[in-house]
Amino acid sequence: MGSTVIRNGTIVTADLSYEADLLIEGGRITAIGHGLTGDEVLDATGCYVMPGGIDPHTHLEMPFMGTHSTDDFASGTRAAIAGGTTMVVDFALPSPGQSLLDALKTWHNKSGQAACDYSYHMAITWWDRQVFDEMETVVRDHGITSFKHFMAYKGALMVNDDELFASFSRCAELGAIPMVHAENGDVVAELQARLLSEGNTGPEAHAYSRPSSVEGEATNRAIMIADMAGVPLYVVHTSCEEAHEAIRRAKMQGKRVWGEPLIQHLILDESEYAHPDWDHAARRVMSPPFRDKRHQDSLWAGLASGTLSVVATDHCAFTTEQKRNGVDDFTRIPNGTGGLEDRMPLLWTHGVNTGRLTMNEFVAVTSTNSAKILGCYPKKGAILVGADADIVVWDPEKEKTITAAAQVSAIDYNVFEGQKVKGLPRYVLSRGHVSLRDGALDTREGHGEFVARAPQGPVNRALSSWKTLTAPRPVARSGIPASGV
Ligand SMILES: NC(=O)NCCC(=O)O
Ligand SMILES: [Zn+2]
Ligand SMILES: [Zn+2]
């Protein structure tokens, strides 16, 4: 690979905007300055040169609810690049009883076709001594430093509070980060059964069965458990004010908690489930479900104020045919929606173009914050000499209307169909390889590499010092009365 120069653009990072050229050699940024030369020149006139997006939450080829999500690492990472995202973090999901290391092998087999770099979180779907032991191997030998826990999906992926506490405590010892899907799974299961028995079988009942208070309660509970374990907490797909309020309050108390809204929850609302077309509503079934304007305003405020940290997609794309598995019973509609290709353009359109977010905040929540939280900064999420050349050259004037017909994702619809976006990538570079030019993909299957991440980040270290300092200690006493026996 020869050298590449990106010229005439404005570099925008999480904290600075300035005019400079970039030189890229061997897949990395090797110089930032003026008048740089290289074998290939990419013209960024009128564009912003930003760290490529990092989507910290995807499910590519995920085995779930009797099927597999249709976008795999090949189509999913191509879709990512088409929208300016250059790294995805997926979830290795051991089935209950399965070794974490076996699950990891399965995910490595799936990801061989990735066109951009990727990492995994490891899910904790069951608990015993083997899981406890393997967590250390996963962190130390495999560079996977975040562990996901489902507080919902009872009878499938859900773990209980005692398991959460044990696993969070293990994360504290290992310098890893626990993550939660926060919904009260017991209450959801009861509500689902009641709704079905009352004849509520359609996709709208999915939303009725998962009210925002169910998410708020679980978020509070997970925060308390993390606090008791002395570990930070990452709350995935924060969709409502109650969950955001719990995170906000925890932060104000000095607890280290990160909230992750999805682009779907920021843009789409619960009225989608009232659509007269069953397919339309079922295609939008995901957990947590879409909410109303009050919740959306809360999420936007959280991003602007910093109480919410990153924007993800939870990309888990099922075809219409797969959604129809639940035609008589909403609890069998595979949960999940797509968004990888549209996250960055939609967030720019509804965030930066409206003034809700600055460009620097956009970079922070789409890229840099994820890299910092997850332990791969500044290799990823940065425009710095030595960083990987994962770069998006962003044209703020470029427009399109989102359609399934023109999308890269392998499914047959797009939940954002008809939405107009202004702000799209002109070029996308994945470790120096120009993978998108003027809207045309030139990806290489298998170019993507696994990103091993470092444990014991600054937040873990600080919490562990504080925990040691404040640990309960016996009071030293001189005169202890004799026992009564
Ligand atoms: N979110 C969703 O509905 N599907 C993917 C699995 C999960 O993240 O809960
Ligand atoms: Zn989830
Ligand atoms: Zn998910």
Image (cartoon, rainbow, N blue to C red):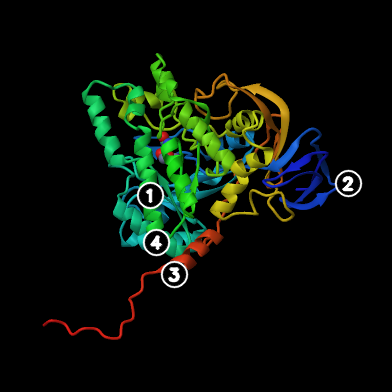
Q: Residues within 10 Å of mark 3 (few under 14, many from 20)?
A: few
Percent coordinates x, y for residue 230 in the rendering: 42, 60
Rendered location of residue 270, percent (x, y): 43, 24
Disc 1/disc 2 C-alpha distance (Å): 52 Å
- The verdict on label 4 being within 8 Å of ligand 2 is no
Amino acid type at image mark 4: Arg
Q: Which mark is residue 468?
A: 3
Q: CA distance from mark 2 to mark 4?
A: 51 Å
Estimate how packed mark 4 is, as few (under 14), some (14 to 19) or many (20 or more) residues with alpha carbons within 10 Å: many
Q: Which residue is mark 4?
A: 170
Q: Amino acid at mark 2?
A: Gly
Question: Can you tell which mark lies on residue 35?
Answer: 2
Q: Amino acid at mark 3?
A: Thr
Give the mark nearer the N terminus: 1 vs 2.
2
Identify the image quadrant of residue 301: top right
Query: Mark 2 to mark 3: distance in Å?
Result: 52 Å
